[in-house]
Amino acid sequence: MAPAPPVSSAADDHSRLLAFLYRCPVGIIEALASGEILLINAYASQILMPLVRDGGLANLLDVLAPWTDEVRALLAASEGDRGVVCTSHQVRLHGLKDAEDRPMFLSFTIHKMENDRFMVSFFDVTERVAQEQAITEAIEIHAHQAGRIELASTILHDIGNAITGLGTIIGRLVNEPQWPEVAALSRMVQLFRANARAMSQALGAGKGEALVDYTEALLTTLDEREVQWRELAQRLSKSLYHVQEILTIQRQFTPDGMTVAAQALPLNDLVQDALTLTEGGLSKRGVRVQVSVPSGIPPISVDRTRMTQVLVNLLKNAEESFDEVGAAQEGKLIEIDAQAAAGGQVRLRICDNGAGFEPARAGELFERGTTRKPRGSGLGLYTSRSTLEAYGGTISITSPGPGRGATITIELPASVDQESQPCRTS
């Protein structure tokens, strides 16, 4: 019989709680309305010490006074006996910059307790603000470029390169795992709930419950911030896809004979880039993807942006085919495999078990303007075939019949060497 686990005493729980608060990766301060600091943890000291001019951390408002007066104004404007004063209030520290010469920002959440005491939490959001500003600036730059698109293949190609790269980054943001801060704070909330009575005994009547309320509000705020971040990434992804469709349409009017540089690229890298750009739609539809591209497959000589766009078009066609069979279908699957073929060719297949089509329709699907989508342009497969033929390749599509899926087969010449080669567009 296994021995019973040791029973922790209230003193042990209290010690562990205080140790957790002290090491918590969020700055926590208990202060009076005058700014006098009653309690401060290690993270808060770490952030505030570089701001102190006289070497002391006795008064929060005095420490922040040379850099910002916003926190003083928030405390002064608080009303009622207790409650949330602000959540995730972003404050810029004027005159201060981080190691990368960026303006410093702190995010404050303030909870008013009884007797004009305040629980103040904050953390450094300089990196996050810089990322948001960088994304906003990138969107503005690309919007400006898109508004001045000229009907010339070289300009469209340069913009396509930038959009594809930005799309890959945003695709990673869309599929970023849960913020670790949310998980850590959730565990802290659970701990506080379980020990609310012990905290009140240790910190004073009502303070345990107030701290529970405060941490729950902080967790809710952080959850909302994460949701907003993901919604922003989703909107950016949709906007970039729209720009890519516009570029695809514009390329149909480029003059014949324009040249686009090609380079030897690993097929698996191109497939992974395309999957990153389409992962959001695949995940939303519950489509599983299996990839088998052996490492020994020789590279192909193509332009990265155009070939990635071809694969994105084909993957989107495959994923959207499941819309026609309904969301209830189980076992939605797209299989991607590659192999070396005869005559120095590389063969890539994309198979799905989606809606399929009548076999006799296979040829007409590559005709310009043909589409089964309500909002489709009918240029996806047409443009894909034109691009592949420009690199000496072929594309075909087959289906056993409606409801039985479809298979797209691409063949391209393996790269003769690693040197960049020009490719004539049609």
Image: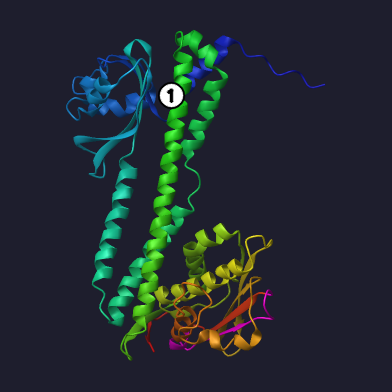
Outermost residue toward the right in this view: 1
Q: State which quarter of the image contains the C terminus.
A: bottom left
Question: How many numbered marks appear?
Answer: 1
Rendered residue at 57%/71% (across/down):
318
Q: Is residue 353 magenta?
A: no
Q: How far across and down, in percent of the image, does residue 141 sit? A: 26, 62
Rendered residue at 55%/26% (across/down):
190
User: Crowding near pointer 1: few (<14 within 10 Å), some, many (20+)?
Assistant: many
**Quadrant position of residue 362:** bottom right
Magenta residues? 388-404
Question: Could one spot residue 111 in this view of the protein?
Answer: yes
**Tag 1: residue type?**
Tyr
Q: How far across and down, in percent of the image, does residue 383 sit? A: 44, 82
Rendered residue at 47%/74% (across/down):
376
Q: Is residue 119 left or right of residue 363?
A: left
Q: Nearer the viewer, residue 353 or 161?
A: 353
Q: How far across and down, in percent of the image, does residue 365 sit? A: 54, 84
Q: Nearer the viewer, residue 383 or 86?
A: 86
Q: State which quarter of the image contains the N terminus.
A: top right
Can you say whether 57 is above or below 290 in the image?
above
Question: Could one spot residue 266 in this view of the protein?
Answer: no
Q: Is residue 129 left or right of residue 241?
A: left
Q: How far across and down, in percent of the image, does residue 94 sit? A: 18, 35
Rendered residue at 21%/20% (across/down):
62
For disc 1, the marked residue is: 214
Outermost residue toward the front in this view: 374
Can you say whether 162 is above or below 425 in the image?
above
- The coloring applied to the image is rainbow
Tell me the element at label 1: helix
